[in-house]
């Protein structure tokens, strides 16, 4: 599917509970000239097959770079097979370079620089933006001329994202909200077109700020356990598969509040088992 003059979406149906709306791989540039690929999917061979079939439908253009948003397996699992087929260097956050070198060889891995500009076919320019939070090695990509923002797992198309470090995540959202993006192209879920895509970064920030207020309200009620906070804050019909992620998010809010000295952590106590 073509979502802008130089952006093509390879959509992979995906039943994972954390990926509502499936998974997306993007080809950016001119199929008649050169292109850049964003992410390579999970290790599932059927995923790789779909990516390579999409590549063939585009006419097997020259791939100048394969770039990855971050090192979670559903983004790099198919990297070795995709790189073998496309014979392109792999660009990633410096913190991910060692891991990817073990998959495709050190000579095939290029460390991206913050705000580096990549060029590809059709005169398309792609800027790399370091956006830690969901993962410390996360990178988003922006095609300013077409106002398309590739958000990886920082912003999803049909759900909120999990976070490793909330302080960093909020700063990354702030960075993205300053761009003039019209289209959000996430790693999971549907592509978000204008007008919703225009304000989605700010909406994500609002969602996180709202969740923080809910955590503070739960504390005010005397609820001190993250698991009990999840029961108080989230819908009663929250899927069981999503509860661990919800608990991790609550813990991240508590850690942020602790760093800001707005809450105090009370160490757990222990006793002998019966």
Image: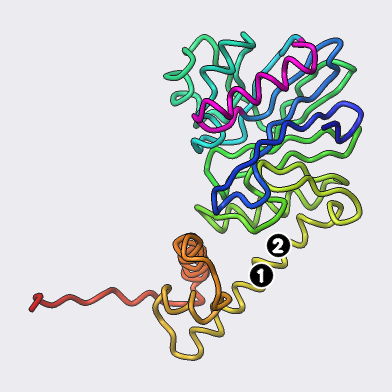
Percent x, y of residue 182: 88, 46
Percent x, y of residue 23: 65, 40
Percent x, y of residue 84: 56, 11
State the extent of the magenta-drawn residues as a range.
Answer: 40-61
| Residue 244 numbered tag | none
Front one among 264 and 46: 46
Total number of numbered labels? 2
Q: Quadrant of residue 26?
A: top right
Q: Quadrant of residue 244?
A: bottom left
Direction from residue 102 to residue 152 in the image, left or right: right
Q: Is residue 130 magenta?
A: no
Q: Quadrant of residue 4?
A: top right
Quadrant holding the N terminus: top right
- The furthest residue to the bottom: 221
Q: Please say if 246 is above or below 42.
A: below
Front one among 34 and 50: 50
Direction from residue 125 to residue 265 in the image, left or right: left
Front one among 56 and 117: 56
Assign a secondary structure to mark 1.
helix
Mark 2 and mark 1 residues within 8 Å of each other at the beta carbon: yes
Seen at 48% across and 70% down, the residue is 254
Seen at 69% across and 38% down, the residue is 140
Seen at 87% across and 52% down, the residue is 198
Dot 2 alpha-carbon crowd within 10 angstroms: few under 14, some 14 to 19, many 20 or more: some
Q: Is residue 54 magenta?
A: yes
Q: Please say if 165 is above or below 149.
A: below
Q: Which residue is mark 1?
A: 209
Dot 1 alpha-carbon crowd within 10 angstroms: few under 14, some 14 to 19, many 20 or more: some
Percent x, y of residue 25: 68, 32
Disc 2 and disc 1: Cα gap in Å? 6 Å
| Residue 205 numbered tag | 2
């Amino acid at each position: 599917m073509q979502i802008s003059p130089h952006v093509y979406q390879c959509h992979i149906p995906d039943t994972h509970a954390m990926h509502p709306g499936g998974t997306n791989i993007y080809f950016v540039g001119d199929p008649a000239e050169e292109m850049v690929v964003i992410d390579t999917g999970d290790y599932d061979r059927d995923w790789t097959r779909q990516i390579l079939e999409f590549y063939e439908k585009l006419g097997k253009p020259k791939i100048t770079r394969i770039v990855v948003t971050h090192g979670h397996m559903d983004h790099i699992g198919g990297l070795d097979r995709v790189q073998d087929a496309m014979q392109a260097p792999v660009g990633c956050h410096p913190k991910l370079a060692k891991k990817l070198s073990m998959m495709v060889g050190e000579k095939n891995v290029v460390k991206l620089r913050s705000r580096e500009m990549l060029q590809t076919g059709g005169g398309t320019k792609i800027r790399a933006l370091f956006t830690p939070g969901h993962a410390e090695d996360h990178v988003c990509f922006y095609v300013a001329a077409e106002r398309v923002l590739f958000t990886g797992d920082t912003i999803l198309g049909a759900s909120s994202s999990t976070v490793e470090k909330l302080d960093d995540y909020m700063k990354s959202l702030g960075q993205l909200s300053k761009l003039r993006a019209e289209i959000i192209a996430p790693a999971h879920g549907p592509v978000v077109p204008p007008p919703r895509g225009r304000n989605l970064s700010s909406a994500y920030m609002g969602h996180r700020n709202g969740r923080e207020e809910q955590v503070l309200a739960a504390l005010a009620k005397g609820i001190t356990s993250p698991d009990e906070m999840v029961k108080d804050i989230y819908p009663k019909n929250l899927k069981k598969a999503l509860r661990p992620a919800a608990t991790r998010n609550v813990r991240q809010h508590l850690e942020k509040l602790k760093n800001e000295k707005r809450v105090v952590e009370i160490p757990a106590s222990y006793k002998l088992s019966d």
